[in-house]
Amino acid sequence: MTTPVLAVSRRTRSTPFTPRVEALGVKGYTVYNHMLLATSFRGVEQDYHHLKRHVQIWDVGCERQVELKGPDAAHLLQLMTVRDVSNTQFGQGLYVPLVDEDGGMVNDPVVLKLGEDRFWLSVADSDVWLWARGLAYGLGLDVEVFEPDVWPLAIQGPRAEELMTAAFGDAVRGLRFFGFQPFAFRGHDFIVARSGWSKQGGFEIYVDRADLALELWDYLWDAGEPFNIGPGCPNVIERIEGGLLSYGNDMTRENNPLECGLDRYCYTQGGFDSIGLAAVEKIHRKGIIRKVRGLRIDGDPAAVGTEAWAVHDGSNPIGQVTSAAASPDFGCIVAFAMLDKGFWSPGQTVRVNTPHGERSGTVCDLPFPKPEAKQV
């Protein structure tokens, strides 16, 4: 059987870090925000073990920034979300569900406030800038909306703080989660945030100078050698264990933030302008009819592939698995499932139709409780 090959063209943009990613033996790519994103280096399971024990450097240049700049920047941002962002401070990042007029999820970026009239939306995989430009134009807002030349570089893993301290000094330790501040490198200030798409801890450096990108990579690589640094990328096993939902996989515009477990990021009491607020308030009053939960699925490993797995109660459909992976530390398949009301209680058993036959699954809270890591 021939393995499909990803055809790379100008529509699948590389990043300033691509030469290092390829020199370190990347084994696969996916397309994310029309850009290349590595999926594996040593193998998904080997990358998983390394990430949970050491430190990795990730090219996440595909994590595009949508910049809102101008007198109406804050107003446009508030229109796009049901989280109250009026008290956001410089140096503070916020996880912000973006919703449409029906309350459907458009994206779930981290927002960085760079000034009173300037914000970056660090977006997941969807064309947020087109939606934001359309709103700005249609409403006649005084705001620029564009994608700046910024390519994030992530340092992730339990030894990430040690590496970053060695590279940038002890001040890095003072960053709170989602907090950010500028740090100097070669006479240029890069924004550094305590953030990243893993639960192992880490940082993201917002690289806005392509000419310094490879110098920065090499500097961090050298600083990380005492901590067993390796190349890495978002890891499907680790993200599921950590309860990190993927926009486009685990939630889409067909889902609202309440059923995605994002209640704490939704201010359902109103009091500000948001195009989706009335819809989400109505959903909140009526109550949700489905909810994302964790599933522990029995049996041998299996990959979810491109199709969701049907979940049923023995006879009737009750939901679907959206992401799944075999977890070495849990000794089973861990998965996200969108389940109907009445079937999402922790400990409840369900049936799952996998590509390798029907299996039993047990509903659990997210994130998955941490098991003792196995020695490898």
Image: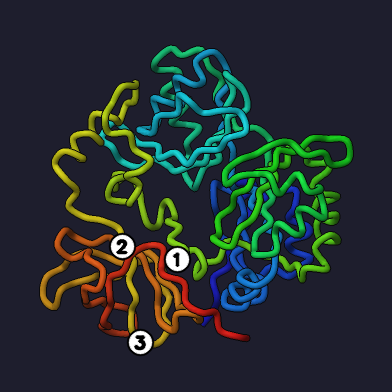
Q: Tag 1: residue type?
A: Ile
Is 38 in front, or is 99? Answer: 99
Q: Which residue is mark 1?
A: 240
Is 108 in front, or is 262? Answer: 262
> Residue 218 appears in which quarter of the rendering?
bottom right
Would residue 195 appear left or right of 332 to someone viewing this image? right
Q: Which mark is residue 17?
A: none
Q: Residues within 10 Å of mark 3 (few under 14, many from 20)?
A: some
Residue 128 in the image, given as x and y percentages of width and height: 47, 36
Q: Which residue is mark 3?
A: 299
Structural distance between the alpha carbons of marks 1 and 3 = 17 Å
Q: Tag 3: residue type?
A: Gly
Q: Secondary structure at mark 2?
A: strand
On screen, residue 105 above or below 228: above
Q: Residue at x 41, y 68 (%)?
A: 368
Q: Tag 2: residue type?
A: Arg
Q: Which residue is mark 2?
A: 293
Q: Residues within 10 Å of mark 1 (few under 14, many from 20)?
A: many
Confirm or deny contact between disc 2 and disc 1 (CB under 8 A). Answer: no
Q: Secondary structure at mark 3?
A: loop
- The label nearer to you, 2 versus 3, is 2
Q: Residue at x 17, y 52 (%)?
A: 289
Q: Secondary structure at mark 1?
A: helix
Structural distance between the alpha carbons of marks 2 and 1 = 11 Å
Location of the C terminus (image quadrant): bottom right
> Residue 134 appears in which quarter of the rendering?
top left
> Residue 96 appears in which quarter of the rendering?
top left
Structural distance between the alpha carbons of marks 2 and 3 = 19 Å
The mark that comes first in sequence, 1 or 3, is: 1
The mark that comes first in sequence, 2 or 3, is: 2
